[in-house]
Structure formats: C-alpha cells, structure tokens
Image (cartoon, rainbow, N blue to C red):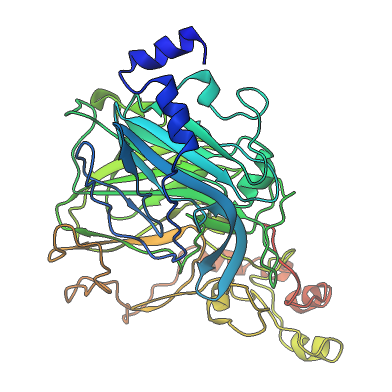
C-alpha cells in the first residue's frame, strides 16, 4: 500500500494498513456453511449499528464478526449441491454450501472486510456489483487484481458508502461461473432515516437465475448462451420456492437482481407496486409510478414496494410464460385443434411408449408425472387448494393474512375465500355468438383435420428437453 492509498483508507476513519495485513495473516472468521434450502428467519444484528434485516427467499444471511470496528465476513467459493425443488438436486458452484451464497447485510458507512477462499477447481474473483469502492477492490480479474488461485484466500476491504440493493458475483470465467450458480445478494441499510428509503415491515430479497440442465442429469451445461431450461428464484424452481408471507396492512419491499441472460418482467397480482430503488440507489419519491409488472433487464436490480392491503394467496411470477414452467421436451409442435382420433394407436405400433401431447392445449401436462427421468421436475408441478397449479420455474405466491403475526414468516397455509367471492360456473343458457351463423356459410373451406394429423412427425416425449 503506497502513501496515497494509505491516506485514502485512513480518511475513512478505520484501521491502519498494518492492522489490515496482520488481521489477514492471523485468524480468519470461521466460515459458516449452510446446506438447507429453507428460507432462514431474518438475522437480527447483534453487533454493529441496528437495522431491520431482510429475508432471503430460500436463503440466509451471512454472519459476521466485528474486529476493531471492521465488519468481517468469510465467503468460501466451492462446489455445492442445491435442491432446485423437491425431487431434483443440481451440482452447482456457490458460496458457503449454497447457490446463491449468503446475503451480506451491512449498514451505510460500515467498513467491511471480506475474506474469500477459493475451493473451486479453477481461479475466481468476486465483483461487488454496484458498490462505490477503491478500484483495486472491484474484483475484475486482470483489470483490478490477480485472480484468486485454487486453494488461496484473498481479502477485500472497503466502506459501504451508499445504502441500497446490490449483489456479488465472480469476474473471472464469468460465463461458466455464473452459469454454475455463483452469485449472492448484498443489502446496505441506511445509517439514518433517508428521505427516499421507507421503513418497511417485511423486506424480501432474491436473485433471478437460470440453468441449462438436461433432464436426467445434475450439472448445468456451462457453454449455454441463451437456451436455458430452468428458470429460478435463488436457484429454486416452483414448487420449490417458498411463498412470501405477510400481515394485512404491512408495507412490503421485495428486492430482486437479474443474473440470467435475458430480461424478466416480474408481475404481482392483486396489488400495485412502485420501483423504489435500483442498483444505482433509491428512486426519489417524485420519480416513481405505479406498476403491476416491472421488467428487470440483465444485470439490473429492482426493489419494489407496496402496502399488502388485500387478503389472499396472490401469484407473483415472471410474465414470460415459458419462464414460469419447468423443463419440457423440445421441438413440441403446436397440436391445439388437431384431431388425433385413431392416430395414437397407429403410432404405438411403431413406438410403444408414444404419448399424445397438447391436443387441447398443454394444461393436461400438469398431471403428467410418469415417464420422467430421475432428477427432472415435472413440467408443471404445483398443487393448490383448488387443483393443480399449471406453473413452475419463476413462480411463487404472496400470502396476505389478517392474523399473520408481526415478524412471523411461516406459511399460513392456503387462503379460505369468503363465501360468494370465487369465480363460479354459469349454468344458465348460452346465447349463440352472433358471428357464428355467417362463419357457418364458409364451412366448406375448412381443411380436413384428420388428413393434416397424419402428416405430423412421430416423436417420443421422453427426449431431452429445453427450448425455453
Ligand atoms: Cu422471466
């Protein structure tokens, strides 16, 4: 450290250069390893400045220790096993036993020291996305630092200068390491009351990520560029994603970051939200507008806020419908409206386990649980109080209850709708559509559907699958 750097770090009012190197050489904080995919309760700060902690969906917050006024964390980059959803384990790379790694929570003005141990089979670094920090702490291998060799530990140290929603991820062999699940969330809480940061009752966070894992296998294909088949919140796919459970009237914040290779229009039901912050910082209140969907582009972070003022179980999902699904066979032709009568039997003479898909849309697939290779999720797999939920992937629910206790994040079960408030079947007479009579005049021009069906390709539904 030269004199100018020393003065710069001394200007932040923290430890001297010699103290840094001594600590780095002496005892490191013991890394905490967590392998459960359960949503951990909020970690209340027991040392340092107080704040209202976040809840990481199907994740947890890293512990820290205070060493002479510096908040110290220890991240271990390593291969992990992550349950994507019950029935499917993936072999990923992550931090401290999980993908994503633990959430880092600090307070504006905190001096933070992060020990990063590399237990991967190749070098790595960590970039602290969105942070103001000294250039040499920014984590881009080659540009800002040497990569962290296998088996070595590097130390990053900087002051968390501005409050907000951030993330961390490698900046070495980026495409492979992010495709393998290396990423984590970072929240810097405001030190004092901030004009553009509300105090909230519930504060959730998670990363949007995606994998390409062939049905029956457990390791992502790391050279995939666009054609991913598993769309996840924090490396979990519905029905593996926990619901976000709140009390009626709560002010709720949800923070999300996108480390997939495409954008995600994230949509809430039953409420309107405002985007109150990005990875660039809080959005001034006068610059916000109401939305029910916000598009999160690649590499962006968004925090949305609203009052949970409507009881019920509300869907919360990516609005790209193929992102709210789990892996499916590829190259499935559109079969809607095609009459297959008699066709299946003839094909089964050639292909004994042939199954018909999609004659009446693909909704039937939600009940199809047979014939899946191990380690594969049913394409649509969730179950709700009124039957199967035809979605997977980036989908969860947002549960608002009158009697959810403050600070209680447990799942209250399914919502019981008050009598007379659910959609119901019409049993009266149906008027004939006015245009039907004129269309009937053209009937002779409708093609022969049976003949078209026989020209379809024969394919087995057990094939490997992506194309999302
Ligand atoms: Cu999406």
367 on left or right of 464: left
User: Is residue 92 positioned above or below 104 on the image?
Assistant: below
- Residue 277 visible in the picture: no
Q: Nearer the viewer, residue 22 or 405?
A: 22
Q: Nearer the viewer, residue 12 or 314?
A: 12
Q: Image quadrant for the C terminus?
A: bottom right
49 on left or right of 282: left
The residue at the point 58 percent across, 69 percent down is 89
- Classify residue 47 by image quadrant: top left
Q: Nearer the viewer, residue 352 or 336?
A: 352
- Classify residue 261 by image quadrant: top right
The residue at the point 40 percent across, 50 percent down is 267
Residue 74 appears at what percent x and percent y? Answer: 45, 45
Residue 222 appears at what percent x and percent y? Answer: 71, 51
User: Is residue 100 positioned above or below 87 on the image?
Assistant: above
Q: Nearer the viewer, residue 332 or 251?
A: 251
User: Is residue 455 positioned above or below 15 on the image?
Assistant: below
- Classify residue 33 by image quadrant: bottom left
91 on left or right of 455: left
What is the tally of numbered marks visible in this picture?
0
Q: Residue furthest top?
A: 4
Residue 236 appears at what percent x and percent y? Answer: 49, 61
366 on left or right of 456: left
- Residue 360 visible in the picture: yes
The residue at the point 69 percent across, 58 percent down is 467
């Amino acid at each position: 450290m030269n004199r100018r750097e020393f003065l710069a770090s001394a200007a932040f009012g923290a430890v001297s250069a010699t103290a840094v190197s001594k600590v780095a050489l002496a005892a490191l904080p013991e890394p905490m390893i967590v392998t459960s995919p359960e949503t951990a309760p909020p970690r209340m700060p027991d040392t340092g400045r107080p704040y209202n902690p976040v809840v990481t969906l199907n994740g947890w917050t890293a512990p820290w220790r205070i060493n002479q006024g510096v908040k110290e964390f220890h991240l271990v980059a390593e291969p992990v096993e992550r349950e994507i959803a019950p029935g499917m384990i993936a072999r990923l790379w992550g931090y401290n036993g999980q993908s994503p790694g633990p959430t880092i929570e600090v307070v504006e003005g905190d001096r933070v020291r992060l020990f990063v141990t590399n237990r991967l089979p190749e070098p790595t670094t960590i970039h602290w996305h969105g942070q103001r920090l000294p250039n040499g702490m920014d984590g881009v291998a080659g540009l800002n630092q040497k990569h962290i060799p296998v088996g070595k530990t590097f130390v990053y140290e900087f002051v968390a200068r501005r409050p907000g929603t951030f993330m961390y991820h490698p900046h070495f062999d980026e495409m492979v390491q992010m495709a393998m699940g290396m990423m984590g969330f970072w929240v810097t809480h405001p030190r004092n009351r901030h004009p553009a940061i509300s105090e909230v009752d519930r504060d959730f966070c998670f990363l949007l990520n995606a994998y390409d894992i062939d049905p029956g296998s457990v390791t992502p294909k790391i050279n995939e560029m666009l054609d991913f088949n598993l769309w996840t919140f924090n490396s979990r796919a519905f029905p593996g994603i926990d619901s976000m459970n709140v009390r009626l009237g709560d002010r709720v914040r949800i923070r999300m970051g996108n480390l997939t290779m495409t954008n995600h229009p994230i949509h809430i039901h039953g409420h309107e939200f405002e985007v109150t912050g990005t990875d660039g910082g809080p959005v001034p209140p006068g610059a916000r507008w109401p939305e029910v969907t916000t598009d999160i582009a690649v590499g962006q972070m968004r925090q949305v806020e609203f009052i949970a003022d409507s009881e019920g179980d509300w869907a919360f999902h990516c609005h790209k419908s193929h992102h709210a699904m789990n892996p499916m066979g590829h190259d499935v032709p559109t079969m809607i409206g095609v009459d297959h009568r008699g066709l299946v039997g003839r094909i089964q003479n050639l292909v004994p386990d042939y199954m018909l898909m999609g004659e009446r849309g693909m909704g039937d697939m939600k009940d199809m649980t047979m014939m899946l290779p191990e380690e594969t999720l049913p394409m649509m797999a969730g179950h709700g109080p009124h039957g199967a939920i035809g979605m997977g992937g980036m989908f969860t629910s947002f549960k608002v209850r009158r009697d959810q206790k403050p600070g209680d994040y447990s799942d209250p079960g399914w919502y019981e709708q008050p009598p007379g408030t659910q959609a119901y079947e019409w049993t009266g007479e149906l008027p004939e559509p006015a245009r039907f009579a004129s269309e009937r005049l053209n009937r002779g021009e409708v093609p022969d559907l049976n003949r078209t069906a026989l020209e379809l390709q024969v394919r087995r539904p057990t094939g490997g699958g992506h194309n999302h």
